[in-house]
Image (tube, rainbow, N blue to C red):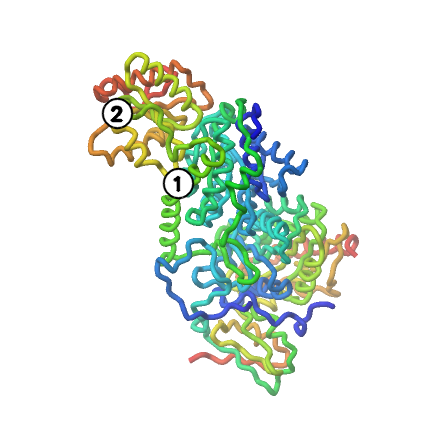
């Protein structure tokens, strides 16, 4: 039975946290834990969710949870999974790391865990920059985005490099299950989390989670923008399972990339030419998706 | 277990745990002071679709006896629920 | 009890087998490798019932060990030199999290220049990371420390990780006859792992959290107090160890003929044995020479050293380390301890063995000669001496 708003567990596990209003990351963590239930053991590296959730004596996880080193989400999950399995516990080991914690500093440990086939779920909540430290560029910051370390000036218009493709990097390991998602399409995300919980071995889920202050959008627009990124084709909802890629949602017609970009402060400076570059890279990606991932 | 507010919020040296290991879900402060506007439910318009509950980053919206309830102790007033509600049953009212 | 001809690393692995860690996570680095190779074989032939985790770095080795410890099982890892430095962040994390992990470190020089041979700059650079640090003097002591370390680390008044240091190659790869206790003896000495510092499904825990300025200091003071407490726990564990295994250890330091000694070498690690022999040679000449082999650098044996130098006219600190721009770190620590005496004892630093350079018996005799000269004051002996070289500091 698929997960819906109606049948989603009423229990809350991530509550009273100090995330900014409208935080996409906290929305992802909150609902994923509702799917995984009280026996989830959560690992959160240094980053937004650990900073807002674990400041003694305000401890905002109702389940077992721990902060890992920034680079150590996956490796700590490995140790936890081994120990609890040895002790015969009924549990799910799940990590929630941001884009920097996953695609930059944590990629080595993540790769090691996938290589070992450790029975863990690794969820990357991607807000496309180092938000906790004040919006610095990460390996998952998209082309053109203005951050505090990729300022948009006369010489350089924000980040000049495209986003690292973590989903396909995870898949290239031959991982049992990988998926992309967005907090804008919550049930799609939650069903992927639920599916991951039933698969043995390493699972990787990459969920887009807008950050209102980092993206320059109103707090109330997190979900709307997280939908639009899929609707305009700049993000795609897909799965890698049993060695095959599959899209789980195909927009019939893309909404305007320009509209998506221009409502965000971080893209305000982009020229028509920049937007064309972004559109053409989207089209190239989708051409491949439509040909190979059906 | 849902984290909840505890009576004891200050700890002496002796009471501070020896290790960085403590009761899960131990809350000592509310978030209501963050709010500039509060979501208010119009019961007549609400169709109980639960989208506001599903998309609340703080988990403060719940369903009880066919009613939508909001925990104003922890609602930060982001307004996502107001935007998501297709029935137009949630209005953001300025805090005074 | 069986007796076998074993290297320091192999002896340590035998000790670990007896301690029965349930998770071993390690990444290879010379000269640590043979200890984890033996453990992998033990896991394969099931003489050690453990999960052997092939991590992809030292950072992950210790991160994984912390996860396993928080999961409630006994853990082991081992490293050396660059590996120790690569996991440095996790060292502080493991001790702050009060995870009673045991780690073996094969003392090795640090790059640059690259060098795989033994000196103590790796571990001594990490004295402040909040771990108990012990230096083995022999393969037998290494095996015994493998067992004793868990007993000390897991004591509820301690709950701290322990780094057991073995001199690279000189101890890790040198063979000697070693007594191996039986599993029954080991089980009698080391109870099953129990901790309250772990996840709990009946009463869930939030772990390794932040603490702001208001509370942070308390965790640090408690950490410090636990380290201080460990001194008594070490002595108690050694007492029980003696009762079961018949081998005696002497707490934070080992003293050799210090009772009436006027000239004392203070050192650490496997070089101790050569120093004992040199002291005997001087005693044959009627010179009251003695040696203090520091076993534990943390907690630091301030009181023990002060008591042992009661008759000393001068002391020399021999170490395989230098803190550039200052002096050897052991020397700094010893001098700080000597400050609490009510009289001044001239002290000199002898830095040797850097990058694995041999320290010869003749070097140690030279050190004693310089200490003896040094009673006349700093005009006669340099404060810092690079031994076995013509180079002056």
Number of residues whose C-alpha sits closer than 10 Å to that of mark 2, classed few (under 14), some (14–19) or many (20 or more): many
Nearest the eye: C211 or A253: C211
Q: Quadrant of the C terminus of chain B?
A: bottom left
Hey, which quadrant is residue A182 in on the image? Answer: bottom right
Q: Can you give x and y, in whole percent of width and height, for residue A110 in the image?
A: 61, 47
Number of residues whose C-alpha sits closer than 10 Å to that of mark 1, classed few (under 14), some (14–19) or many (20 or more): few
Q: Can you give x and y, in whole percent of width and height, for residue A14 in the image?
A: 54, 65
Which residue is painted at 38% across and 35% down in the image? C252
Residue A27: mark in rendering: none
* Label 1 to label 2: alpha-carbon separation: 29 Å
Nearest the eye: B77 or C246: C246
Which residue is painted at 59% across and 34% down in the image? C36
Q: Residue under label 1, please give it.
A: C128
Q: Can you give x and y, in whole percent of width and height, for residue C269 in the image?
A: 43, 27
Which residue is painted at 31% across and 36% down in the image? C302
Nearest the eye: A243 or C315: C315
Q: Quadrant of the N terminus of chain B?
A: bottom right
Q: Residue under label 2, please give it.
A: C312
Query: Left of C305 or right of it: where is A291?
Result: right
Mark closest to the chain's N terminus, 1 or 2? 1
Asked if disc 1 and disc 2 are in contact, CB closer than 8 Å, the reply is no
Q: Can you give x and y, in whole percent of width and height, for residue C187 in the image?
A: 55, 41
Q: Nearer the viewer, mark 1 or mark 2?
A: 2
What's the chain of the residue with tag 2?
C
Q: Secondary structure at mark 2?
A: loop
Relative to C37, does residue B34 appear above or below in the rendering?
Answer: below
Q: Secondary structure at mark 1?
A: helix
Hey, which quadrant is residue C65 in on the image? Answer: top right
Relative to A282, does residue C60 appear above or below in the rendering?
Answer: above
Hey, which quadrant is residue C377 in on the image? Answer: top left
What's the chain of the residue with tag 1?
C
């Amino acid at each position: 039975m698929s997960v819906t708003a109606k049948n989603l567990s009423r229990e809350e596990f991530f509550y009273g946290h100090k995330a900014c209003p409208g935080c996409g990351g906290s929305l992802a963590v909150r609902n994923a834990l509702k799917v995984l239930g009280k026996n989830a053991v959560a690992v959160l590296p240094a980053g937004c969710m650990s900073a807002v959730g674990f400041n003694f004596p305000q401890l905002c996880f109702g389940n077992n949870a721990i902060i890992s080193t920034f680079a150590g989400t996956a490796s700590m999950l490995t140790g936890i999974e081994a120990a609890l399995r040895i002790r015969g516990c009924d549990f799910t080991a799940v990590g929630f790391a941001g884009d920097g914690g996953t695609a930059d500093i944590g990629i080595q440990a993540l790769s090691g865990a996938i290589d070992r086939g450790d029975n863990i779920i690794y969820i990357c909540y991607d807000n496309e920059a180092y938000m906790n430290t004040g919006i610095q560029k990460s390996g998952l910051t998209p082309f053109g985005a203005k951050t505090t370390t990729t300022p948009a000036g006369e010489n350089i218009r924000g980040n000049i490099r495209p986003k690292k493709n973590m989903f396909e990097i995870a898949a290239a390991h031959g991982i049992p299950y990988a998926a992309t998602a967005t907090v804008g399409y919550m049930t799609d995300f939650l069903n992927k989390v639920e599916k991951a919980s039933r698969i043995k071995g390493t699972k990787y889920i990459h969920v887009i989670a807008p950050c209102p202050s980092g993206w320059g959008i109103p707090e109330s627009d997190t979900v709307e923008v997280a939908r639009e990124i899929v609707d305009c084709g700049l993000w795609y909802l897909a799965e890698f399972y049993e060695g095959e890629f599959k899209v789980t949602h195909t927009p019939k017609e893309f909404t305007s990339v320009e509209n998506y970009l221009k409502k965000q402060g971080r893209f305000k400076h982009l020229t028509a030419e920049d937007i064309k570059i972004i559109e053409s890279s989207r089209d190239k990606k989708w051409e491949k998706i439509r040909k190979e991932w059906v | 277990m849902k984290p909840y507010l505890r009576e004891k919020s200050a700890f002496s040296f002796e009471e501070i745990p020896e290790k960085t290991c403590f009761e899960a879900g131990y809350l000592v402060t509310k978030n209501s002071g963050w709010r500039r506007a509060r979501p208010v439910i119009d019961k007549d318009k609400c169709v109980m679709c639960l989208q506001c509950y599903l998309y609340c980053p703080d988990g403060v919206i719940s369903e009880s006896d066919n009613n939508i309830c909001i925990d104003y102790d922890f609602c930060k007033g982001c307004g996502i629920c107001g935007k998501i509600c297709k029935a137009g049953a949630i209005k953001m009212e300025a805090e005074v | 009890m069986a007796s076998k001809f074993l290297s320091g690393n192999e002896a340590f692995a035998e000790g670990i087998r007896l301690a029965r860690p349930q998770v071993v996570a390690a990444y290879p680095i010379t000269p640590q490798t043979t200890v984890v190779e033996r453990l992998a074989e033990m896991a394969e032939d099931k003489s050690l019932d453990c999960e052997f985790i092939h991590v992809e770095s030292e950072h992950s080795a210790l991160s994984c060990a912390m996860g396993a410890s928080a999961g409630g099982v006994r853990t082991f890892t081992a490293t050396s030199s660059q590996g120790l430095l690569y996991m440095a962040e996790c060292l502080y994390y493991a001790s702050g999290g009060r995870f009673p992990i045991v780690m073996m470190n094969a003392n090795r020089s640090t790059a640059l220049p690259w060098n795989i041979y033994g000196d103590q700059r790796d571990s001594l650079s990490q004295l402040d990371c909040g771990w108990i640090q012990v230096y083995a003097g022999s393969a037998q002591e290494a095996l015994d420390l493998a067992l004793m370390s868990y007993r000390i680390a897991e004591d509820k008044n301690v709950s701290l990780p322990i780094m057991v240091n073995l001199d690279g190659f000189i101890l890790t790869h040198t063979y000697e006859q070693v007594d191996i206790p039986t599993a029954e003896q080991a089980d009698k000495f080391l109870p099953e792992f129990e901790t309250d510092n772990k996840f709990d499904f009946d009463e869930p825990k939030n772990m390794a959290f932040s603490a702001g300025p208001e509370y942070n200091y308390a965790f640090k003071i408690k950490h410090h107090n636990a380290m201080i407490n460990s001194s008594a726990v070490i002595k108690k564990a050694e007492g029980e160890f003696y009762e079961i295994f018949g081998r005696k250890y002497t707490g934070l330091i080992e003293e050799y003929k210090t009772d009436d000694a006027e000239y004392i070498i203070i050192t650490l690690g496997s070089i101790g044995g050569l120093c004992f022999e040199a002291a005997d040679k001087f005693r044959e000449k009627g010179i009251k020479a003695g040696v203090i082999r520091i076993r534990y650098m943390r907690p630091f044996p301030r009181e023990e050293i002060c008591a042992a130098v009661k008759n000393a006219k001068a002391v020399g600190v021999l170490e395989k380390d230098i803190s550039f721009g200052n002096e050897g770190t052991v020397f700094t620590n010893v001098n700080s301890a000597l400050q609490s005496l009510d009289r001044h004892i001239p002290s000199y630093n002898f830095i040797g063995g850097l990058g694995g350079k041999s320290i010869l018996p003749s070097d140690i005799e030279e050190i004693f000669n310089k200490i003896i000269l040094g009673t006349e004051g700093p005009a006669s002996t340099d404060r810092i001496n690079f031994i076995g070289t013509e180079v002056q500091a």
